Image (spheres, rainbow, N blue to C red):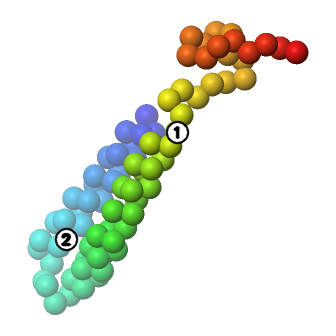
């Protein structure tokens, strides 16, 4: 539910900024150019970080009690 709310909020902000950029006079829209530059610089860095995080995480994250898990061998409780 929260994921859907965040998705719609980001989409609404993107549409509002897009409409503002399209219909606002160019002389008064310098803040939109600043926002655009920030995202232009930030997105490749965030994408690289997301890819590295995805590639570095283990295939399966085991819990402490793996007796119910088919991905891991059962741990011996000493």
- Asked if the residue under mark 1 is in contact with the one under mark 2, i.e. CB atoms within 8 Å, the reply is no
Residue 26 location in percent, x, y? Answer: 13, 85
Between 55 and 9, the one nearer to me in the picture: 55
Total of numbered circles in the picture?
2
Between 7 and 47, the one nearer to me in the picture: 47
Q: Residue at x 33, y 54 (%)?
A: 10
Question: Which residue does the numbered mark 2 point to in the structure image?
Answer: 20
Lateral position of residue 30 relative to residue 43, left or right: left
Q: From mark 2 to mark 1, how far is it between C-alphas?
A: 40 Å
Q: Is residue 48 above or below residue 41?
A: above
Question: Which residue does the numbered mark 1 point to in the structure image?
Answer: 57
Q: Residue furthest right?
A: 78
Q: Is residue 72 above or below residue 23?
A: above
Q: Residue at x 35, y 51 (%)?
A: 9
Residue 7 location in percent, x, y? Answer: 34, 46
Q: Identify the element where label 2 is drawn.
A: helix
Q: Earlier in the sequence, mark 2 or mark 1?
A: 2
Q: Residues within 10 Å of mark 2 (few under 14, many from 20)?
A: few
Give the quadrant of residue 4.
top left
Which dot marks residue 35? none
Q: Which quadrant is home to the N terminus?
A: top left
Between 6 and 37, the one nearer to me in the picture: 37
Q: Which quadrant is home to the C terminus?
A: top right
Give the quadrant of residue 70.
top right
Residue 55 location in percent, x, y? Answer: 44, 42
Q: Is residue 6 above or below residue 58?
A: below
Q: Identify the element where label 1 is drawn.
A: loop
Q: Nearer the viewer, mark 2 or mark 1?
A: 1
Q: Residue at x 40, y 48 (%)?
A: 51
Residue 72 location in percent, x, y? Answer: 61, 17
Between 31 and 49, the one nearer to me in the picture: 49
Q: Is residue 75 above or below residue 33?
A: above
């Amino acid at each position: 539910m929260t994921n859907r709310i965040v998705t719609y909020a980001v989409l609404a902000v993107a549409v509002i900024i897009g409409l503002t950029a399209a219909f606002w006079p160019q002389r008064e829209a310098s803040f939109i150019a600043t926002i655009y530059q920030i995202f232009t610089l930030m997105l490749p860095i965030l994408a690289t970080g997301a890819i590295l995080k995805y590639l570095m995480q283990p295939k399966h994250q085991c819990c402490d009690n793996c007796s119910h898990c088919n991905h891991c061998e059962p741990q011996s409780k000493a």
